[in-house]
Image (cartoon, rainbow, N blue to C red):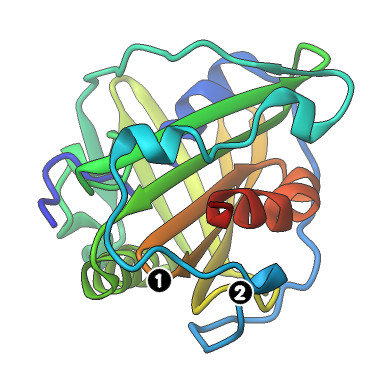
């Protein structure tokens, strides 16, 4: 995968979170380290044998009604192009400065939706779906998550903003064929935000859910189930 537009997955979220939210002190549950392992997909849904198109993936995203009362889908935002520099994490810096600001994995077939709860930027959750060969998905996601969790503490300079980062692996439920999960804590300008990010690969479909730790835990299984529906 081309890394010049690939992000450290949730650095795109932090710029929005720190720009528009108050302090968040949510803690993720089950903080034990997790590594990819085999498991059967939920509800015995058979994964797609070949990669799906972006249009097909868009039909498999969660919508506001799936999340429950009080959720609103956010409109797509224009990508920012601030200069980004990773400080104190060589593995992450190797992905490239622009890689740290893109917001999405660089797989050509993708779809994304973001939601906020009752208008609060502290209660946001986003879902990204990707489709490619199993090898490309597994290798690409593994490389990025390993880079992100290789440094417990580092800094990211985004334009004129310096962000203190803390990253740790987190436990993931036994869904799909492979899974990755991490918790990131951002501190900038006296504001603190905690984001959990969990990725589940089942066959040629990758589901990535990011946002408030409690919301990620609450909606991950539903996102996987909906993504596998035929």
Q: Residue at (32%, 20%) from the top-left corner?
A: 160
Residue 24 figure quarter: top right
The residue at the point 51 percent across, 84 percent down is: 35
Q: Residue at point 17% right, 55% down?
A: 95
Helix, strand or loop at mark 2: loop
In this view of the protein, which residue sits in the foreground, 38 or 19?
A: 38
Give the left or right position of residue 49, taking residue 124 as reference.
Answer: left
Q: Is residue 172 visible?
A: no
- Percent across and percent down for residue 221 are 71, 58
Q: Residue at x 55, y 57 (%)?
A: 228
In the depicted view, which residue is nearer to us: 191 or 216? 216
Q: Which circle marks residue 203 in the picture?
A: 1
Question: Hey, which quadrant is residue 55 in on the image?
Answer: top left
Q: Which one is in front, 206 or 204?
A: 204
Evaluate if marks 1 and 2 touch, with contact meaning CB atoms under 8 Å apart. Answer: yes
Q: Position of residue 79 (x, y in %)?
A: 30, 18
Give the CA distance from mark 1 to mark 2. 9 Å
- Can you tell which quarter of the image residue 118 is in? top right
- Residue at the outermost bottom position: 38
Q: Is residue 116 visible?
A: yes
Mark 2 sits on what residue? 41
- Label 2: how many residues lie within 10 Å, few (<14), some (14-19) or many (20+)? many
Relative to residue 50, is residue 35 depicted above or below? Answer: below
In the image: residue 197, left or right of residue 89: right
In this rendering, the count of numbered labels is 2
Q: Measured from the top left, where is residue 101 in percent x and y? A: 29, 34
Q: Taking 119 as reference, is 64 above or below it?
A: below
């Amino acid at each position: 995968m081309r890394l010049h537009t690939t992000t450290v997955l949730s650095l795109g979220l932090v710029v929005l979170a720190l720009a528009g939210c108050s302090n968040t002190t949510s803690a993720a549950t089950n903080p034990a380290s997790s590594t990819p392992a085999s498991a059967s997909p939920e509800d015995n849904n058979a994964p797609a044998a070949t990669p799906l198109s972006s249009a097909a993936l868009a039909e498999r995203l969660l919508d506001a009604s799936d999340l429950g009362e009080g959720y609103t889908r956010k409109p797509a935002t224009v990508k920012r192009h601030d200069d980004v520099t990773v400080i104190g994490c060589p593995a992450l810096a190797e992905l490239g400065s622009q890689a740290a600001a893109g917001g999405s994995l660089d797989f050509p077939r993708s779809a994304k939706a973001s939601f906020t709860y009752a208008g609060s930027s502290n209660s946001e959750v986003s879902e990204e779906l990707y489709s490619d060969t199993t090898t490309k998905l597994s290798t690409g996601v593994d490389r990025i998550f390993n880079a992100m969790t290789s440094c417990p503490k580092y800094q990211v300079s985004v334009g004129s903003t310096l962000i203190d980062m803390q990253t740790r692996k987190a436990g993931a439920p036994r869904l799909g064929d492979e899974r990755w999960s991490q918790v990131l804590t951002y501190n900038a300008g006296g504001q603190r935000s905690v984001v959990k990010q969990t990725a589940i690969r089942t066959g040629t479909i990758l589901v990535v859910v990011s946002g408030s730790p409690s919301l990620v835990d609450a909606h991950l299984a539903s996102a996987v189930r909906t993504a596998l529906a035929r």
